Amino acid sequence: MTRTSGWSSRVLALLKGGNTAASLAQIKAAPSVKDIRQLRAAIEAAHLTGRWPDVDVTISDQIDALSAPRLHRSP
């Protein structure tokens, strides 16, 4: 059984409330790729895709950034 964190529903509530600046900040500080994907799915399920173009871009950028392997400095 999987457990959802509720992060995506809180960010979606920020978006629906009109506070896009706070939601963008939350997306940039997202806990994991899984949470961002849940947010994207919730936005699509609510038929709100395209309403906030900057949010859509930030979501895809964060998915790419968190999915990429980390570059480490050699010791």
Image: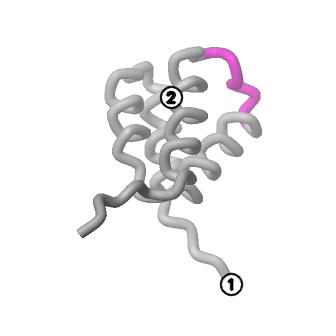
Measured along the vertical axis of the image, is residue 53 above or below residue 70? above
Q: What's the amino acid at mark 2?
A: Thr
The quarter holding residue 64 reads: top right
Disc 2 element: helix
Q: Residues within 10 Å of mark 1 (few under 14, many from 20)?
A: few
Q: Residue at x 48, y 65 (%)?
A: 5
In terms of depth relative to the viewer, which is nearer, 3 or 16? 3
* x then y, percent, for residue 68: 54, 51
Q: Residue furthest bottom?
A: 1
Label 1 belongs to which residue?
A: 1
Q: Earlier in the sequence, mark 2 or mark 1?
A: 1
Q: Residue at x 23, y 69 (%)?
A: 75
* x then y, percent, for residue 33: 55, 55
Find the magenta span and give its range: 46-51
Magenta stretch: dominant SS? loop
Marks 2,1: beta carbons within 8 A: no
Measured along the vertical axis of the image, is residue 3 above or below residue 19? below
Label 2 belongs to which residue?
A: 58
